[in-house]
Amino acid sequence: MDEVLTLIGTDLITRPNSILMGDFNIQFNEDEDPEVLGFKDMMQAIGLDQHVHFYMQNKGNTLDQIYTVFNPCPILFNVCQQQFLSDHCLIMGLVKLQKEKPKMKQIEMRDIANMDKDQFKKLLDTMLTKMDFLGTVNMLVICFEAILNSLMDIFAPIK
């Protein structure tokens, strides 16, 4: 199992549209087997969903697995058993390939170029001379930021 973790690494789990599939040579239908339980727990712990829930081998075993990174919007649908070409059957499923539409962002800005800079400087100077410097540096920064924001809201409101 350590080899699987090494192969998967963080690459797979940081890519939400990844699909990991293969013959893991573990009989997944043996639910009480410690190796099976450990493998399933490991895959679930790293955030992978398993999509094969049927027998894959003509002897009644499930060796092949398909995993995707857990995603509230699944990329793999309708995984089902198809015909047997050898001692294993084919697996078929649908993969969602379309991208989500980008979301619109609202941009806010201030019209600093057209503000009355002289009046702004005069009012800022007046407010700063009345500010109490007895507090901590953090408090001074918070007060200065509040004064600056309130003046900007007057002279260059957010649009």
Image (cartoon, grey):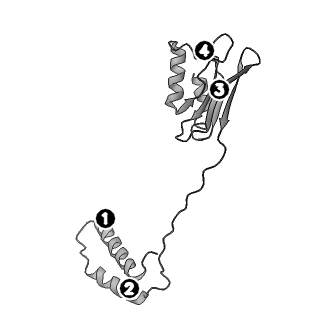
Name the image quarter holding the N terminus. top right
Q: Distance between the residues labelled 2 and 1?
A: 23 Å
Which disc, if any, is residue 74? none
Quadrant position of residue 116: bottom left
Task: Determine the residue positioned at 54% across, 36% down.
Answer: 70
Q: Are marks 2 and 4 in contact (CB under 8 Å)?
A: no
Q: Do the residues labelled 3 and 4 touch (CB within 8 Å)?
A: no
Give the label, 1 or 3, closer to the camera: 3
Q: Where is residue 103 in the image (x, y as percent from the top left)?
A: 55, 58
Give the label, 2 or 4, closer to the camera: 4
Q: Do the residues labelled 1 and 3 touch (CB within 8 Å)?
A: no
Q: Distance between the residues labelled 1 and 4?
A: 62 Å
Give the label, 2 or 3, closer to the camera: 3
Q: Do the residues labelled 1 and 4 touch (CB within 8 Å)?
A: no
Residue type indicated by callout 2: Lys
Dot 1 or dot 4: first in sequence order is 4
Q: Is mark 4 on a helix, strand or loop?
A: loop
Dot 2 or dot 1: first in sequence order is 2
Q: Do the residues labelled 2 and 3 touch (CB within 8 Å)?
A: no
Q: Are marks 2 and 1 in contact (CB under 8 Å)?
A: no
Q: How far apart are marks 2 and 4 (CA)?
A: 77 Å
Q: Position of residue 158 (x, y in %)?
A: 44, 75
Can you identify the residue that label 2 sits on? 121
Task: Determine the residue positioned at 69% across, 29% down.
Answer: 92
Can you identify the residue that label 3 sits on? 80
Can you identify the residue that label 4 sits on? 27
Residue type indicated by callout 4: Gln
In the rendered image of this protein, does residue 29 appear above or below residue 17? Answer: above
Q: Residues within 10 Å of mark 4 (few under 14, many from 20)?
A: some
Q: Is mark 1 on a helix, strand or loop?
A: helix
